[in-house]
């Protein structure tokens, strides 16, 4: 009986020691999880309270041209934006490669558009004609030539969109010519002058190719380094505003104003 009681006491002591170890482990794990969750919450608070990118003037970086939306939304957020920002690298590379091949073909090799169309049609017609006539001798079915026609709806939609854009541009030029906003007038004149210089340096196809290359390189680079570019642009705009203020005080303010400008101010 004494041995039985001693074994019983030893068993109870072992069970108590096991329970103590389990409770210590649970206490340690709960303490560790609470500490990790508190550290995570502290990190989240730090991230939330971290200030946005600032410029050298200590204020929030202003996006280029007052942009508030992402670059992808600025380009419409559709397939053209995906192409310009290289969301689908195969399509973007194919479009840029095709434009490069066309430019090399017409500008470097000096191939003409009418010659290219005629040669292409000659090869296609000759191949289809020979295939159709040779099919009877080689006992194979004649080639199926699909009917090709230009659909009416896309052509009308494109013509309507083009007409609307041209009308909007003409209306903008009319407003600039009729109003007395000297700053906007000088900006438009400067833009047209730069366009005339580019037109004198290269032909339309080269200019179009340059635009395609710029659209496939500048937006994606700007999206990648937009904080640095916006900070630099803010400094440049600040300096331009200072120079314009000096130019306005020395030159523009001395230009006599018409009665229409005075009436608007009154």
Image (spheres, rainbow, N blue to C red):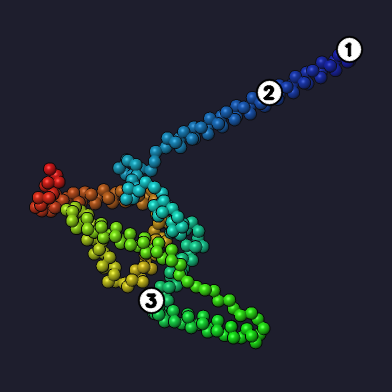
Left or right of residue 140: residue 122 = left
Mark 3 lies on residue: 107
Figure quadrant of residue 118: bottom left
Residue at x 65%, y 81% (from the top left corner):
140
Q: Secondary structure at mark 3?
A: helix
> Alpha-carbon neighbours of circle 3 within 10 Å: few (<14), some, or many (≥20)?
some
Mark before the other along the chain sequence, 3 or 1? 1
> How far apart in space, not on screen, are marks 2 and 1 (Cα)?
32 Å
Q: Is residue 254 among what the camera can see?
A: no
Q: Nearer the viewer, residue 159 or 53?
A: 159
Farthest residue, direction right: 1
Q: Is residue 157 among what the camera can see?
A: yes
Q: Quadrant of the C terminus?
A: top left
Q: Secondary structure at mark 1?
A: helix
Q: Secondary structure at mark 2?
A: helix
Mark 1 lies on residue: 2
Is the residue under label 3 in contact with that under label 2 (CB below 8 Å)? no
Residue 238 in the image: above or below residue 94 = above
Q: Nearer the viewer, residue 160 or 169?
A: 160
Residue at x 26%, y 48% (from the top left corner):
238
Residue 23: which disc? 2
> x%, y% of residue 84?
43, 59
Residue at x 19%, y 58% (from the top left corner):
177
């Amino acid at each position: 009986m004494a041995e039985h009681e001693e074994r019983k006491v030893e068993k109870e002591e072992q069970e108590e020691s096991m329970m103590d170890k389990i409770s210590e482990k649970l206490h340690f794990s709960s303490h560790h999880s609470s500490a990790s969750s508190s550290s995570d919450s502290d990190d989240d608070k730090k991230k939330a309270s971290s200030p946005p990118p600032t410029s050298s003037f200590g204020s929030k970086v202003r996006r280029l041209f007052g942009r508030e939306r992402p670059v992808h939304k600025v380009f419409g957020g559709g397939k053209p934006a995906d192409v310009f920002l290289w969301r689908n690298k195969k399509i973007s590379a194919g479009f840029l490669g095709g434009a490069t091949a066309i430019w090399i073909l017409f500008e470097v090799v000096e191939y003409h558009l009418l010659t290219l169309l005629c040669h292409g049609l000659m090869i296609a017609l000759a191949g289809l004609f020979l295939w159709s006539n040779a099919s009877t001798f080689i006992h194979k079915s004649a080639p199926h030539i699909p009917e090709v026609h230009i659909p009416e709806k896309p052509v009308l939609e494109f013509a309507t969109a083009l007409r609307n854009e041209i009308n909007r541009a003409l209306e903008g030029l009319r407003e600039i010519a009729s109003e007395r906003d000297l700053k906007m007038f000088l900006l438009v004149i400067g833009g047209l002058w730069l366009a005339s210089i580019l037109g004198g340096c290269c032909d339309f196809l080269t200019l179009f190719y340059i635009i395609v290359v710029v659209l496939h390189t500048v937006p994606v680079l700007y999206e990648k380094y937009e904080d640095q570019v916006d900070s630099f642009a803010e400094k440049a705009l600040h300096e331009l505003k200072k120079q314009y203020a000096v130019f306005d005080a020395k030159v523009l303010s001395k230009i006599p104003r018409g009665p229409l400008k005075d009436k608007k101010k009154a």
